[in-house]
Image: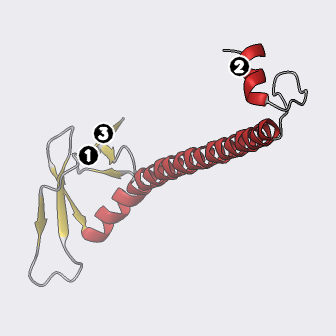
Amino acid sequence: MVTTVRKTIDMVVDLDGWSGGDIVVVTCGSANVPIALTRHQYDLFRTNGESFYCSLGHKHSWSVSENDRLKQRLTEAQEVANAATERQRQAEQRTLDATARARTAETALGRATKRVHAGVCIHCHRSFLNVQRHMATKHAT
């Protein structure tokens, strides 16, 4: 059975004359006894998710290692960035499509305007000298 260690450090002990660095004290979740680890051991167990034992033999580890947690956060951040990039690409494509449609409509309107000014009926494509009179009498709206 693996017990998860409480996430907080109970205390950091600085011993005079001890050259091994800080001592980190965590509490066994099963027996409620203190477990003394050097800072190096604590950091190693925390980062790699490796198991360690209390003095009564209970196995402990962090449920998710720091490396795994950071990798997960990185993956999530990359997914968010990829989704944002894809949304931006789609928006740019919609903009290009709308611009092309507007340009096509503008061209068609320009052609129709030229034809009307030249005396060509836009409905029946016949030429008339007095297009305004023709439009009013034959194609009244």
The residue depicted at 74 percent of the width and 39 percent of the height is 113
Q: From the viewer's perspective, is 110 left or right of 58?
A: right
Measure the alpha-carbon separation of dots 1 and 3.
Answer: 6 Å
Q: Nearer the viewer, residue 102 or 26?
A: 102
Q: Are marks 1 and 3 in contact (CB under 8 Å)?
A: yes
User: Which quadrant of the view contains residue 108?
Assistant: top right
Tell me which amino acid carries mark 1.
Val
- Under tag 1, what secondary structure? loop
Q: Position of residue 88 (x, y in %)?
A: 56, 49
Left/right placement of residue 20 relative to residue 51 reads left
Q: Amino acid at mark 2?
A: Ala
* C-alpha separation, residue under disc 3 versus residue under disc 2: 91 Å
Residues at marks 1 and 2, CA–CA distance in whole angstroms: 90 Å
Mark number displayed over residue 136? 2
Q: Amino acid at mark 3?
A: Thr
Residue 111 position, x and y percent, is 80, 41
Within-10-Å neighbours for mark 1: few <14, some 14–19, many 20+? some
Residue at label 3?
Answer: 3
Rendering colour mode: secondary structure
Question: Between 92 and 14, which is closer to the camera in this rendering?
Answer: 92
Q: Residue furthest left?
A: 16
- Residue at far right of view: 126
Mark 2 surroundings within 10 Å by alpha-carbon count, few (fewer than 14), some (14 through 19), many (20 or more): few
**Of marks 1 and 2, which one's residue comes earlier in the chain?**
1
Residue picked out by circle 1: 5
